[in-house]
Image (spheres, grey):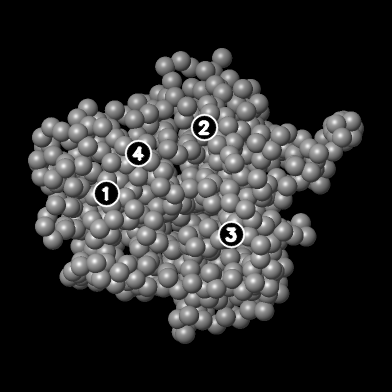
Amino acid sequence: MCGICGIVSTSLIEPNAVHAMNHQLIHRGPDGAGIWQTAHAQLGHRRLAIIDLVTGDQPFSSPDGAWQLVFNGEIYNFQALRQQLHGLGHQFHTNSDTEVLLAALIEWGEHAFSHLAGMFAFAAWHQPSQSLWLVRDRLGKKPLYYSQTKHGLIFGSEIKALLQYPELDRSLNPQALSAYLTYGYVPNPATWYANIQQLAPGHALVWQAGSIRAWQWWQARQIAQQPRLNISEKAAIEQTRQLVRAGVERRLISDVPLGAFLSGGLDSSIVVAEAQALLGQQLHTFSIGFEGGGWYDESSYAELVAKQLGTKHQCFMVEPDAIAKLPQLLAHYDEPFLDSSALPMALLSQMTREHCTVALSGDGGDEVFAGYERFGAGLWTQRYQQLPRLLRQMIEQTIAMLPQTNANSRLARLKRVLAKIQLPLEQGFPRWLMAFTPEELADWGLPALQPSAAERFRQATQGIADPLAQLICYNLASYLPDDLLVKADRMSMAYGLEVRSPFLDQHLVEWALQLPANLHWRGGRGKWLLRQAYAERLPKTIIERPKHGFGVPLDQWFRQQLKPMLHDYLLSPTSHIQQWLTKAKLEQLCQAHWAGTINAGHQLWTLLTLELWLQTHHQMRPYAHNYVD
């Protein structure tokens, strides 16, 4: 696990120009640094040593010097590939997956990508043809940003590395504000910067002589378009166990101490159970709790699992004053970022890094096995839309006439659900993760998002017949790479910790994408297969407990301990966010939340993180025109 960066150009590059970019990535690779440079290319690398601690340094050169490679990630099947490539005549002089990756690229070219099992973002410079290859893994576990310059291209694991390049155009993306307020992030391949793009998950590009050829080499949609597997429940349960176990086993290869996150939820409990059994020794596990307990605190469940499995367990308690870390956390994202669970994730990573360099995670279980409640809501949407129009109108009119109640009441929740399921699926389903709806953006006086959320849904699900597979694919193309994996990567790498996610193993993902819906969702709940597969190995409480999000009690904090923070940042006369959003509307939102008529914690966090970012980048303006009336 590392950080990479580089510059290529048709003109001469100033010597050592990549050094400043590479220095910005020191947190991603505290164990060493490497630079390779020639007249028209410079590559930088920061190393977090995990495998082959002695001879795995980068940039890595091919035996003939024609290729130079910088690589961030892990190739879990590198040992099998090494044996295969050795049979094809390749000689190896290290025990690293980096050398195997370069040999695969030399042997198979762009067909090498499909041979790779793991998480990766890499850049390979071919000196004879003066061309640069950039490649990102299937699901986007590892980040890669790039920008075309006047004479070439720059790239890096994080935006902060690109910002060190003096000639970079730092103009902001005019769609960024509307996108961020909608999703809580700017969807890939765009960023907050108009001239910085992400290389999208499962994509590759080749730069040569100032031109770019880009293509998508893997996509979930193509797999989900295939007919559903005809498989019995018994066979599916056994196959689930085998694939999960294999995914965990592939991620146990390490030359440094390895532990695991344990939230007390089903997914992390399964990963820990398999890892402990495969290792045959006590595993070190780590969790986060919240002072004062309450719904958000899962620490008791984590302790229950740890006790039954016999792990060496540690828990870190989070208090509201941990919010003081927020500016530091945002610096690692380089962009405003909505997900409030970044805070506990950072504290968990910091604590874990004191004991381990690698941590297993349960991330991906909900994505692969349809664990989120919104998947059920998406299925309800289709059923609701099939009701006679007159009946739907009667239901909607009746509920609309009911009085307003507290935001936490059952009636209030019912109204929120109905507001989504009465819309067509492509319009309603994305709203489950929206901070602000299109109607709210219009009310704020902001431009409509292009492409719309509905259009993004249609693009991600085109040609997929199975309704649940549509929802899974949309989630794999949006929330997973743009939120969940960004959070996991930035917060873990901020402390030099590598996080591995067995549920995102390609074999498991591709198999699950072809399963019939009734093996995923049954009895009003997701992850039916996982519950059946591990019912005898985990406590009944863990198997049966409902889905629990990994977050912080924002609603409560913003009404109590952090209420003054909203005054200081959002409602202050010096607030930067008021250049777009009127103080009157900001006050209206805060007052409604404080009164309990709405739960606006999600929205207030979105605005707070944006304000903190603007305070650092206040000299930048996304728009020439001010949209505030």
Q: What amino acid type is highlighted by mark number 4? A: Ala
Q: Nearer the viewer, mark 1 or mark 2?
A: 1
Judged left or right of residue 504, residue 593 is right
Going from the N terminus, do you reach mark 4 or mark 3 first? 4
- Give the residue at mark 1: 123
Please determine whether, in this image, residue 458 is positioned above or below residue 123: above
The tag on residue 211 is none
Residue appearing at x 75%, y 42% in the figure: 382
Q: What residue is disc 3 on?
A: 512
- Circle 4 — which element? strand
The mark that comes first in sequence, 1 or 2, is: 1
Mark 1 is surrounded, within 10 Å at the Cα level, by few (under 14), some (14 to 19) or many (20 or more) other residues, namely many
For disc 2, the marked residue is 179
Left or right of residue 377, residue 33 in this image:
left
Tell which of 76 and 327 is nearer to you.
Answer: 76
Contact, CB < 8 Å: mark 4 with mark 3?
A: no
Q: Is residue 209 visible?
A: yes
The amino acid sitting under disc 3 is Ala
Residue 405 x/y as whole percent: 82, 39
- Per the model, the C-alpha gap separating discs 4 and 3 is 28 Å
N-term mark: 2 or 3: 2
4 and 2 marks in contact (CB < 8 Å)? no
